[in-house]
Amino acid sequence: MLYKTIVLLILSNLFMTYAWYGHLKTLSNKPLYLAILASWLVAFAEYCLQVPANRIGHRVLALGQLKILQEVISLSVFVPFSILYMKESLSWNYLYAGLCILGAVFFVFRG
């Protein structure tokens, strides 16, 4: 069950990261309403993955654990996206943010 949740959350985060930020690169010269419409269409696909992921995951994880797992996956998708696709530079702040999330993982998943 947990494996399915993780795979679905990774896929949903790929869609959502693009829905939230991809338009900044691909649609920056287009009217705002087109960017909004495109983002909503991508977000629909994301929800088709995210809702089952959370339903499956909640069978084996507490809600707080599921949320922290989602945040870890979100940063794991966002950092490569911002560096590779958006061509943003990597800073130490990404590492610090990751360490904070790892701390949250420790506290939420410990006995």
Image: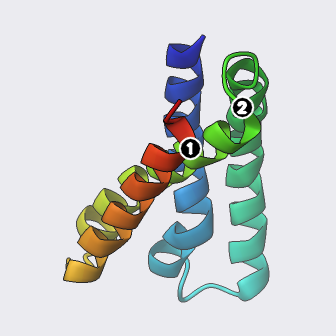
Q: Amino acid at mark 1?
A: Val
Q: Earlier in the sequence, mark 2 or mark 1?
A: 2
> Where on the picture, by quarter, is residue 19?
bottom right
Q: Amino acid at mark 2?
A: Ala
**Any mark on residue 56, and which?**
none
Q: Regarding mark 2 in the picture, which secondary structure is present there?
A: loop
Residue shown at 77% from the left, 46% from the top = 44
Does residue 10 lie above or below 33 as drawn?
A: above
Residue shown at 32% from the left, 63% from the top = 99
Question: Is any part of residue 70 visible from this angle?
Answer: yes
Does residue 11 lie above or below 102 as drawn?
A: above
Does residue 108 lie above or below 62 as drawn?
A: below
> Where on the picture, by quarter, is residue 35?
bottom right
Residue 85 screen position, x and y as percent: 31, 65
Residue shown at 61% from the left, 54% from the top = 16
Q: Regarding mark 1 in the picture, which secondary structure is present there?
A: helix
Q: Left or right: 107 with respect to 32?
A: left
Residue 54 screen position, x and y as percent: 73, 31
> Where on the picture, by quarter, is residue 66?
top right
Q: Left or right: 98 with respect to 68?
A: left
- Which of 6 and 48 lies nearest the eye of the viewer? 6
**Any mark on residue 62, and which?**
2
Label 2, residues with CA under 10 Å away: few <14, some 14-19, many ≥20? few
- The quadrant of the rendering that contains the N terminus is top right
Residue 106 screen position, x and y as percent: 43, 45
- Which of 48 and 26 lies nearest the eye of the viewer? 48
Residue shown at 70% from the left, 63% from the top = 38
C-alpha distance separating marks 2 and 1: 9 Å
Residue 10 screen position, x and y as percent: 49, 37
The answer to whether the residues at label 2 and label 1 have Cβ atoms under 8 Å apart is yes
- Which of 13 and 70 lies nearest the eye of the viewer? 70
**Any mark on residue 108, and which?**
1
